[in-house]
Image (cartoon, rainbow, N blue to C red):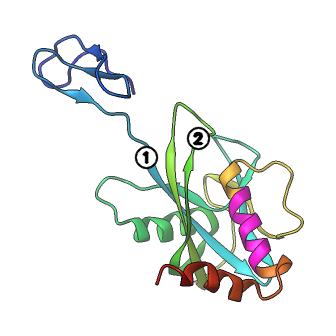
Amino acid sequence: MDYHYCPFCSGSLSVNPKGKRLRRYCPECGFIHYKNPTVGVAVILLRGDQVLLIKRRGSYDGMWCIPCGHVEWDEDIRLCARRELEEETGLQVELGPVFDVHSNFHDPAHQTVGVWFMGKLRGGELQPGSDAREAKFFALDSLPEKMAFPTDLLICQKLKRILLDEKDGLAHLCDEYAKYF
């Protein structure tokens, strides 16, 4: 959202020419409008070399993605990830570690930071929720052509490298992280 008037004193906002980024500010009270991305979460649920995807309803209608959603105000990020997966697929999971994090710039007006968690199936019945047309598993080397988000493709490529392409893919992942310990 772009403010034109200050939400605190109702003064007209101007563009602050100082600094590296042009930001709207209020010369009357000093308010600065920072445009920050929202946080999105996704849960990676694997069945062998297959990943669970949903066919979206609404925004990006008819395109596929890893089950995901936005973190609500006052909502824990991990609880949100579990909630979104269950709403979209009918499945309950035990949430594992963070698999990856990406900035999403594919929609310049609605930028997000995405956090992908690993998940382990604990219950439920696979069925599309109210914002999904379908929910099903796809082989990592046979993903649908119409993927909604470029960052989901990056996630699937990383999974494919770890699980299918690289000899000792999990060992390679451990080596990649070992230099930080």
Q: Residues within 10 Å of mark 1 (few under 14, many from 20)?
A: some
- Which secondary structure class fits the magenta region best? helix
Q: Amino acid at mark 1?
A: Thr
Say above or below: 95 vs 79: below
- At 33% from the left edge and 61% from the top edge, which residue is drawn? 75
In the picture, residue 90 is in which quadrant? bottom right
Q: Which mark is residue 163?
A: none
- At 49% from the left edge and 67% from the top edge, which residue is drawn? 81
Taking 62 as reference, is 37 left or right? left
Q: How far apart in space, not on screen, are marks 1 and 2 (Cα)?
A: 12 Å
Callout 2: SS: loop
Residues shaded magenta: 153-162
Q: Which-is-in-front pick, marks 1 and 2?
A: 2
Quadrant the N terminus occupies? top left
Taking 50 as reference, is 32 left or right? left
- At 60% from the left edge and 62% from the top edge, which residue is drawn? 88
Q: Which mark is residue 38?
A: 1
Q: Which mark is residue 105?
A: 2
Taking 10 as reference, is 20 left or right? right
Tell whether position 123 is magenta: no
Measuring from the top left, give residue 72's x and y in whole percent. 37, 54
Tell whether position 158 is magenta: yes
- At 74% from the left edge and 57% from the top edge, which residue is drawn? 153
Measuring from the top left, give residue 115's x and y in whole percent. 51, 62
Say above or below: 150 vs 84: above
Q: Earlier in the sequence, mark 1 or mark 2?
A: 1
Measuring from the top left, give residue 35's x and y in whole percent. 37, 34
